Image: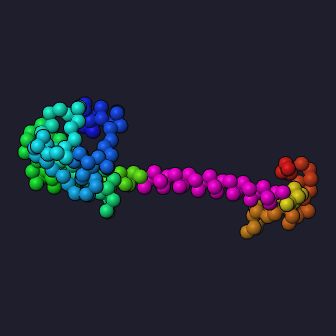
Amino acid sequence: GAGDVGHKLVAQKHQIGLNIPQSLVAQAARSGQVVVVNEVRENPNWLPNELLPETQAEMAVPMMIGDRVVGVLDVQSERVNHFTDQDMQIQTTLASQVSIALENARSFEQAQTAVAEMNALTRRLTREGWQDYLDQTTSEGLGYIFDSSGYDWLKPISEATDEAALWMENGNVSQPAK
């Protein structure tokens, strides 16, 4: 909502149900077509709003993603015969762009939620996998030795040379806790 009235409507979480027969907004949402009434007080489908007592003309533009209505852009004027075909084209373009922006925001939020869920699942499965491995493995020989002498610079402790084994026995390597 724009202006003071728009902010009040947003604060009140103002909504118009789809099944309200006396509403240009609901009519636009149901039909997926722009509804323009340039003299609302003579139209039986007009639903007055107490916060907008000076309304004389109203245009309700469905916000579409494909065939799905995601909202309605409602524009009101204090002048009779205010809205032209050009206004309808401009507001339809605006409604289309806002619809795409809303859909992109929803998609981004869903993707962020999915990534967070996948990260949590990955952490849990990694933790469980390592726990299963550690539960089935003795702590002896569990680890790696750095050997800068050749291509295989990281070797399992089980393949340690006598010199490395002696080095470990002297307390230079701590064994993992179980």
Magenta part of the chain: 107-135
x%, y% of residue 101?
A: 33, 52
Please identify the quadrant where the N terminus is shown. Answer: top left
Name the residue rendered at 26%, 35% in the picture. 6
Asked whether, in this view, residue 44 is left or right of residue 6, the answer is left
In magenta stretch: residue 120: yes
In magenta stretch: residue 119: yes
Between 139 and 10, which is closer to the camera in this rendering? 10
Q: Quadrant of residue 51?
A: top left
> Is 152 rendered above or below residue 92?
below
Q: Is residue 109 visible?
A: yes
Name the residue rendered at 39%, 51% in the picture. 105
Name the residue rendered at 48%, 55% in the picture. 111
Q: Return the residue found at the far bottom.
A: 151
Specify the color scheme: rainbow
Name the residue rendered at 80%, 60% in the picture. 133
Between 45 and 163, which is closer to the camera in this rendering? 45
From the image, give the main secondary structure of the stretch colored magenta: helix
Q: Quadrant of residue 164?
A: bottom right
Between 77 and 99, which is closer to the camera in this rendering? 77
How many labels were placed on the picture? 0
x%, y% of residue 118?
A: 59, 56
Q: Is residue 164 visible?
A: no
x%, y% of residue 29?
A: 28, 53
Asked whether, in this view, residue 21 is left or right of residue 125, the answer is left
x%, y% of residue 125?
A: 69, 57
Asked whether, in this view, residue 163 is left or right of residue 133, the answer is right
